[in-house]
Image (cartoon, grey):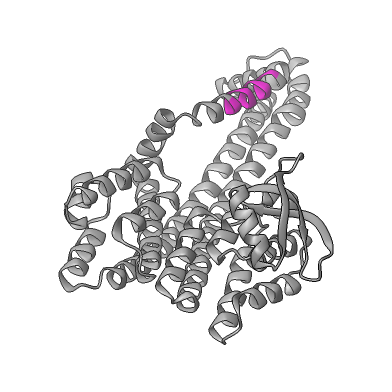
Amino acid sequence: MAVYDYQALAADGKRTSGVITADSPRAARKELRLRQLSPLDVSESRKGRSASAVSGHDQKLPGGDLVVATRQLALLVKAGTPVEEAIGSVAAEAEKPSTRKVFMGVRSSITDGYSVSEALNSAPKAFPAFYRAVVSAGQSSGRLDEVLERLATHLEKSRKMKNKILSALIYPIVLSVIALLVVTLLMIFVVPAIVEQFDTLGQDLPWLTDAVIAVSTFIRQWGVILLIAIFAAGWALRRLFQTPAAREARDRFILSLPVIGKLSRGVAAAAFARTFATLSASGAPVPECLGAARNSMSNAVFRKAVTNVRRKVEEGSTLARAMRAEAVFPPMLMHMVASGERGGDLAGMMERAANYLEDEFDNAATVALGLLEPIMIVVLASIVALIVLSIMLPILQINTLAIG
């Protein structure tokens, strides 16, 4: 969408000028006539900026603002409020200026004569491709209020799933960082101070004490270089995983792990089912549902599998048969899809499958976290106990020699 400078005559004969956004000069003249202006000159703006750049409303929405705004919008539209007025109300209620700016930009586009889906397309950073596809499907089917309500529910459940994943990871990560910090401080400050006392005695030390002293010496001499090497390796891996082949190999390895693989498979399958169900219930065809579901998943193996499924469906295969050929989807999901196709309720069965997979992930994550906490505590306690034991052994040896 381009920006055009225009000069036109108003209904009262006065000359006026300004800027207008349109796909072409012809579309700009048509829009001016709709505004009861007679165009004299329409030319592309020298600034050459897009509509989103002019309004500055194409920016990523922070946190859960999109979830809250979509729920408010769904409630207002369902209550009979015109879409333009509902979006204006959402903008007015927004606490953060960035959110307010995004929705005011969308409202401005609708005021200029664009449809809701076209207005959302002017801010692709704020509204994901899946979001815009669902709204477009709802607008085409004339059930925008129902679709917005379904979309709000989908976003809320997706956010809830992400929060569960973060909650499951926070405690192990914090505990690991604290453990590493404690062991490092012991090695840098405590062990060397004890070693100085033992050196004055001139006695042979136990092998455990020698091993701990060697580790302590290595950390003090090479710790900074080791830390830089770790950060460099992390940066290199991050760059490597930006390539499709490396990202797919990483995700395939994660899926092959005993416990983590099952959890990752469940999360990806739940995201696929939830997105498909939301778009399918909005009246979108199966290939479009598969395209949106693909974009909603971060796992490269699942994304490739869904791409293949879509291609086979477009070639005439049933969805269940195409999914079964990929061998990455949980068997329960494939059974539900087959049942939905036979019964003509694919969206409903996908939604039930998503609910089941999310509940299964919740239970599995709770059990895994319950096992992980004591294991990490035991490992941490064992490391600290070894360091303490390496310090105590020479002291006990000295006491034995003194008594003897």
At which x and y percent is residue 149? 50, 76
Q: Which residue is at the far right? A: 14
**Res 401 → quadrant:** top right
Q: Residue at x 40, y 47 (%)?
A: 260
**Which residue is pictured at 65% across the width and 64% down the height?**
33
| Residue 152 covered by magenta stretch | no
Residue 192 as seen in the image, left or right of residue 344: right
x, y percentage for residue 22? 62, 53
Q: From this viewpoint, which residue is outermost toward the bottom?
A: 79
Residue 124 shows in the view: no
How many dots with numbers? 0
What x and y, as percent, mark residue 53? 71, 48
SS majority, magenta: helix
Instruction: Give the quarter of the image for residue 49.
Output: top right
Q: Nearer the viewer, residue 391 or 26?
A: 26
Q: Is residue 69 visible?
A: yes
Q: Position of residue 304 (x, y in %)?
A: 34, 41
Which residue occupies the foreground of this view, 110 or 168? 110
Q: Nearer the viewer, residue 71 or 88?
A: 88
Above or below — where is 371 with respect to 350? above
Question: Which residues, given as a range, are shown in magenta?
Answer: 225-235
- In this view, the residue farthest toward the top is 202
Q: Quadrant of residue 207?
A: top right
Q: Residue drawn at (53%, 62%), measured in percent from left and top? A: 117
**Considering the image in quadrants, where does the C terminus appear?**
top right
From the viewer's side, name the closer residue of 313 and 293: 313
Q: Is residue 126 found left or right of 55 in the rendered image?
A: left
Q: Is residue 365 placed above or below 11 in the rendered structure?
A: above
Q: Residue at x 60, y 75 (%)?
A: 83
